Image (tube, rainbow, N blue to C red):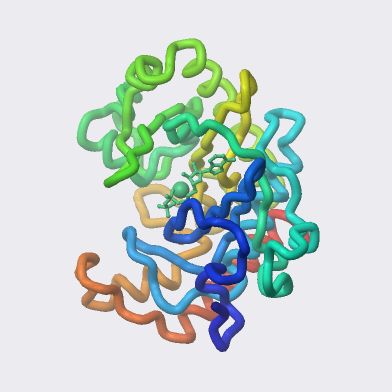
Amino acid sequence: MATQTGALSTAEGMVRAPLLHKGKVRELYDLGEHLLIVVTDRISAFDHVLDPPVPDKGRVLNGLSAFWFQHSAELQPNHVVHTDVNRLGDLVKEPEKLTGRIMVTRKAKRIDIECVVRGYITGGGWRQYRATGTVNGISLPSGLRKNEQLAQPIFTPAGKNDVGHDEDIPFEEMARRIGPGLAEELRERSLRLYEFGRRSCAEKGIILADCKFEFGLIGENIILIDELFTPDSSRFWAEEKYGLDMEIDSMDKEPVRRFLAESDWDQNSPPPRLPDSVVADTSSRYREIYRLLTEK
Ligand SMILES: Nc1ncnc2c1ncn2[C@@H]1O[C@H](COP(=O)(O)OP(=O)(O)OP(=O)(O)O)[C@@H](O)[C@H]1O
Ligand SMILES: [Mg+2]
């Protein structure tokens, strides 16, 4: 269904294939051998989907993933088959509404670990460090300041839970769950991908503070799945907004964050409707991130 602004809140009813999974932002359809991922314009905050959707957000997220998957394919094979809605033929009813929002992928057996790499100490990593001096069991030097760059990027996995939140786990626990050989392999690949992303972003004046990868297996092969270096899976900071001991502007959802902070919403009840100006600001932020990163 498209709203009057042209934003896409769902592709349900537009795709002639079974809906396998509906996340807060994306929908997965079963194409038999392949998966169809549709990135809608839905936006979430604190685990709530907000209203209305943000025009072009889905195209930006899907376009960024496609861009990064393409540029990192030599470093790490991934699940992308193509992103061309016209190749889907009769499977979609209104192809023009899905242009730029779809990715056809190979199906992998998902490894139930979120592979998180942190180059800077912030967010959940900062909260762990402040409480314990460690992050996922990794001891860090004392006296680090919020948002400080770490001497070495660290790998801080989380177990994927079907219900509730993903849980931070020490590397040893990851190794216990999936086996030490595979765990070591995923850690190395994640750190390499982070380094690739960090450098590419730095060339464009953006700090890649941290990011999350998901991997799957196709036969014996380890394949990068899901999404890659999008604002939903990575923390991007504009270099000129960077500073220690402060909340850094999030580049994407900042207008939403600010609006929600100023509202009296308690994060449990249904969230307030986003004003048009907040939606418009957020939409142009997504387009700006896309332009900066892809130079398109
Ligand atoms: N190629 C693939 N093969 C198998 N599973 C995949 C592939 N690509 C992505 N996935 C899985 O598809 C799901 C996408 O779901 P999505 O991220 O949209 O929602 P979610 O994680 O359930 O919830 P949230 O809305 O909180 O993100 C994830 O579980 C991801 O691991
Ligand atoms: Mg997800």
Q: Quadrant of residue 63?
A: bottom right
Q: Quadrant of residue 29?
A: bottom right
Placement of 190 over or under 181, stated as above or below: below
Q: Quadrant of residue 285?
A: bottom right
Q: Position of residue 181 (x, y in %)?
A: 50, 11
Residue at 49% from the left image edge and 35% from the top image edge = 119
In the image, is 3 to the left or to the right of 262? right
Q: Nearer the viewer, residue 224 or 30?
A: 30
Q: Nearer the viewer, residue 120 or 64?
A: 64
Residue at 72% from the left image edge and 67% from the top image edge = 99
Q: Position of residue 154 (x, y in %)?
A: 45, 27
Placement of 37 over or under 99, stated as above or below: above
- Quadrant in the picture for the C terminus: bottom right
Residue at 37% from the left image edge and 37% from the top image edge = 160
In the image, is 6 to the left or to the right of 114? right
Q: How many marks?
A: 0
Q: Position of residue 62 (x, y in %)?
A: 64, 57
Q: Can see residue 202?
A: no
- Quadrant in the picture for the N terminus: bottom right
In the image, is 199 to the left or to the right of 24? right
Q: Can see residue 5?
A: yes
In the image, is 158 to the left or to the right of 85? left
Residue at 45% from the left image edge and 38% from the top image edge = 120
Q: Position of residue 280 (x, y in %)?
A: 54, 80
